[in-house]
Image (cartoon, helix red, strand yellow):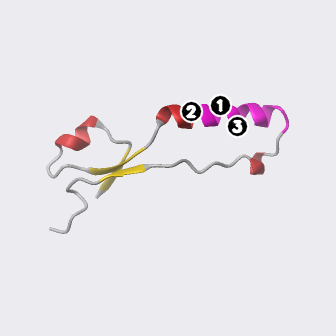
Amino acid sequence: VIGYGNTEAGRYADPPLTTIDYSIEDNGRHLGQMLLQLLAGAPARSLQRLEGVHLLARQSDHAA
Protein backbone atom coordinates (compact mmCIF):
# COMPACT_ATOMS: atom_id res chain seq x y z
CA VAL A 1 0.00 0.00 0.00
CA ILE A 2 1.34 3.45 -0.93
CA GLY A 3 -0.18 6.75 0.18
CA TYR A 4 -0.18 10.20 -1.40
CA GLY A 5 0.63 13.44 0.35
CA ASN A 6 2.93 12.38 3.20
CA THR A 7 0.52 12.99 6.06
CA GLU A 8 1.75 12.76 9.64
CA ALA A 9 -0.51 9.76 10.26
CA GLY A 10 1.41 7.72 7.67
CA ARG A 11 4.53 7.78 9.83
CA TYR A 12 2.70 6.26 12.76
CA ALA A 13 0.67 3.63 10.91
CA ASP A 14 1.54 0.00 11.50
CA PRO A 15 3.42 -0.69 9.31
CA PRO A 16 4.61 2.87 8.51
CA LEU A 17 2.99 4.00 5.24
CA THR A 18 5.20 4.43 2.17
CA THR A 19 4.03 7.62 0.52
CA ILE A 20 4.49 10.01 -2.38
CA ASP A 21 5.42 13.53 -1.26
CA TYR A 22 5.00 16.67 -3.35
CA SER A 23 5.32 20.43 -2.95
CA ILE A 24 1.87 21.90 -2.39
CA GLU A 25 3.35 25.41 -2.73
CA ASP A 26 4.82 24.65 -6.17
CA ASN A 27 1.60 22.95 -7.27
CA GLY A 28 -0.48 25.95 -6.19
CA ARG A 29 1.83 28.46 -7.85
CA HIS A 30 1.83 26.53 -11.14
CA LEU A 31 -1.93 26.13 -11.03
CA GLY A 32 -2.35 29.88 -10.49
CA GLN A 33 -0.02 30.63 -13.40
CA MET A 34 -1.99 28.32 -15.67
CA LEU A 35 -5.27 29.92 -14.59
CA LEU A 36 -3.91 33.37 -15.48
CA GLN A 37 -2.79 32.03 -18.88
CA LEU A 38 -6.23 30.54 -19.45
CA LEU A 39 -7.90 33.85 -18.58
CA ALA A 40 -5.51 35.60 -21.00
CA GLY A 41 -6.78 33.39 -23.83
CA ALA A 42 -4.35 30.45 -23.90
CA PRO A 43 -6.00 27.27 -25.17
CA ALA A 44 -6.75 24.89 -22.29
CA ARG A 45 -5.09 21.93 -24.01
CA SER A 46 -1.76 23.82 -24.02
CA LEU A 47 -1.81 24.18 -20.22
CA GLN A 48 -0.25 20.99 -18.95
CA ARG A 49 2.44 20.40 -16.37
CA LEU A 50 3.77 17.23 -14.81
CA GLU A 51 4.86 17.95 -11.24
CA GLY A 52 7.70 16.02 -9.68
CA VAL A 53 7.17 13.85 -6.61
CA HIS A 54 9.43 12.15 -4.11
CA LEU A 55 8.93 8.59 -2.87
CA LEU A 56 9.33 8.18 0.89
CA ALA A 57 9.90 4.45 1.24
CA ARG A 58 8.63 3.07 4.52
CA GLN A 59 7.40 -0.42 5.28
CA SER A 60 3.88 -0.66 3.81
CA ASP A 61 5.13 -1.51 0.32
CA HIS A 62 7.35 -4.44 1.38
CA ALA A 63 6.19 -7.98 0.86
CA ALA A 64 5.05 -9.64 4.06
Name the residue carrying label 1. 32
Query: What is the CA distance from the residue labelled 1 to the residue labelled 2?
Result: 6 Å
The structure residue drawn at horizontal position 70% and vertical position 37%, both measured from the top left corner, is 34
Report the magenta residues as a range. Answer: 29-41
Type of the residue with mark 2: Gly
For numbered disc 3, what is the local secondary structure?
helix
Q: Position of residue 26 (x, y in %)?
A: 54, 35
Judge left or right: residue 46 versus residue 15.
Answer: right
Q: Amino acid at mark 3?
A: Met
Q: Which mark is residue 28?
A: 2
Vertical relation: 42 (above or below) 32: below
Look at the image and say whether residue 11 sits in the magenta stretch.
no
Residue wearing tag 3 = 34
- The answer to whether the residue labelled 1 contacts the one labelled 2, judged by CB atoms less than 8 Å apart, is yes
Q: Is residue 52 left or right of residue 36?
A: left
Which secondary structure class fits the magenta region best? helix
Give the quadrant of residue 10: top left
Distance from Cα at disc 3 to Cα at disc 1: 5 Å
Residue at the image point whose x is 69% and y is 33% from the top? 33
Label 1 crowding class (10 Å Cα cut-off): few <14, some 14-19, many 20+?
A: few
Is there a contact, CB below 8 Å, between mark 3 and mark 1?
yes
Task: Where is residue 2? Give x, y as percent.
Answer: 32, 55
Q: How many discs mark residues in the rendered view?
A: 3
Question: Residue 54 location in percent, x, y?
Answer: 40, 49
Residue found at x 33% / y 50%: 19
